[in-house]
Image (cartoon, grey):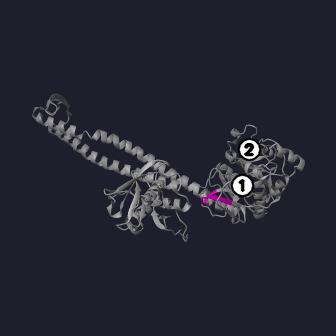
Amino acid sequence: MFYLDGVSLSKIKIEIEENLLNKKVGKIFQNSSLSLTLHFGKKPLFFSCNPSMPLCYINEDKEENLLEESSHFLLMVRKYIVNSALVKIDQLGLDRILRFSFSKINELGQVQNNFIYFEIMGKYSNIILTDGSNKIISVLKKKSIEDNSLRTLFNGEEYTQPVVTKKLNPFEIKKDDFDTILINDGIIDSLEGIGKLLKNEIKSFEDLQEILSEKISPKIYFKDKTPILATVLRIKPKEYDSLSEFNSFGEMINTYIKLKSLSNTFNLLKIQLTGTVEKEIKKSEKIIKNIKKDIEIMKDYNKFKELGDILASVLYNIKRGDKIVNAYDFYNNCYIDISLDPLLSPQSNLEKIYKKSSKMKRGLEISKKRLEEFENKIFYLDSVLSFIEKSKTTDELKNIENELIEEKYIKRKNTKKGKKKIVELPYGTIEINGKTIYFGRNNKENDYLTFKFARKEDIWFHIKDLPGSHFIVKKDDFEDSPEFIEKIATLSAYYSKAHAKEKVTVDYTQKKNLNKPKGAPLGFVTYNIFNSIIVITPEEI
């Protein structure tokens, strides 16, 4: 959780001012419908209206423009803000609203002032561009009017703050008034900019004054190596194992975003890859549906062969021009009528029926192969979705993207010459009892581990009948004990498409017992000799 209240924002504002004040905006990008980046030279100021963590911060990581949008809002912001200097940042009271003041000399030699209002309000967060007289030029999320009927955000209207309950400014309150509020437990209801966690740290008027006057104090608290609270204030969670302190808010928030996999690049790439794979699955499911229809029709090929045999028995009675012939069906012990093409000779009619039977038989064989191919394809794509969901870093997602490019599901991008590729191990590792266990983070890594990395006697683990990671335990590291096997099996269940708390079966066998059928998709194997264990899929590991 990242804790942000009005007091926190007042300290973050000061740090942003120290870094960006009087600097000019060079480039502006919109990486998604909910974000905007202003580049002040080499320092990009990133705005996110994502409901999960609306925030603005100096983004130290160079994020790729994976999905650059060209909206009317972006065009307006570029028109009025590019080449402008940031001259001031104001916080509206202690509300979670920042006003960025920009100034530049326009083409007529006149001073042009504009404002960007950034409203940090959960799902109602927004970015609003106005002129120097506060008249709205453009709004990032135009539907906000539906969410707040007490104000309008039309172009040309004067900007007004969202309607909120009037509260006292903590910087201006007197001790006697504060003591009364404290006795009545009314800090949150009466004082502006104070949230629940900060309220718990305020036991007296002196505490309030110290917190308000303190310099920014960025830190992240951890429990079981997982970040549970990020803050810039003197607050802490009830339980934690360790904490990391940072020199700046920018450093802290960039670290937190990496740890929680919340970066814009990560989220956009995850959305793109998921969308691509789901589209392919949907397309394949439609094809499978049509193939099954064809199979239903073509599986009756033998009926046409029988019909040909029956027609052959009465062929001598047929004349050219006959449209129908009555014949004895010796397969079903009854008489039937057989339709004929009057333009064809009796022999040609017979050949036509036999050809149709042969064609249906061949078509049935081809359709069954195609059905198997597309079912394998969906199994493969399901496994890709599972790997995307389990990915924790942008690099892991990029490896999956490269796999999809090689498998021709995604067109190869034009990469810049001289750009260094990230070098990393082609597999993931986990330590258990001091031993290294290897697993695939995508299907390409699964193939590499199983058929290139593993030796014949090494032990292979995989969840039964579901997409998931291949796990390899070196022969010398394998412990033939129920406890050790259960640990690896539990990991196999977690790194699969199985749902949390679901009871699943995990198979394990020596690598020499595995086979990859010709033409099978990445990560696909078959085996006949194996052992199994039943485990419960964990929620976390």
Amino acid type indicated by mark 1? Lys
Amino acid type indicated by mark 2? Asn
Q: Which residue is mark 1?
A: 79
Q: Is residue 419 one of those drawn in magenta?
A: no
Please name whichever residue, 469 or 287, is drawn nearer the observer in this view of the structure.
469
Q: Residue furthest bottom?
A: 418
Please name whichever residue, 328 or 218, is drawn nearer the observer in this view of the structure.
218
Task: Please tell me which residue is depicted at 85% across the width and 52% down the height of the picture.
Answer: 205
Q: Residue 72's x, y, as percent?
A: 66, 49
Q: Residue 141's x, y, as percent?
A: 68, 46
Please name whichever residue, 479 or 235, is drawn nearer the observer in this view of the structure.
479
342 with respect to 444 (left or right)? left
**Residue 113 image label:** none
Q: Residue 252's x, y, as percent?
A: 68, 62
Secondary element under disc 1, as helix, strand or loop, is helix
48 with respect to 365 (left or right)? right
- Number of numbered tags placed on the structure image: 2
Q: Is residue 222 one of those drawn in magenta?
A: yes
Vertically, is 305 above or below 241? above
Q: Which residue is mark 2?
A: 155
Work out how far the residue at label 2 is from the one at label 1, CA to CA, in angstroms.
15 Å
Vertically, is 146 above or below 73? above
Q: Name the dominant secondary structure of the magenta segment.
A: strand
Can residue 179 be seen in this snapshot?
yes
Task: Please tell me which residue is depicted at 22% across the width and 41% down the height of the picture.
Answer: 357
Can residue 111 be seen in this snapshot?
no
Please name whichever residue, 206 or 134, is drawn nearer the observer in this view of the structure.
206
Nearer-N-terminus badge (2/1): 1
Whether pointer 2 and pointer 1 mark residues with C-beta atoms closer than 8 Å, the reply is no
Q: Which residues are magenta?
A: 220-227
175 with respect to 522 (left or right)? right
Q: Residue 16's x, y, as percent?
A: 75, 60
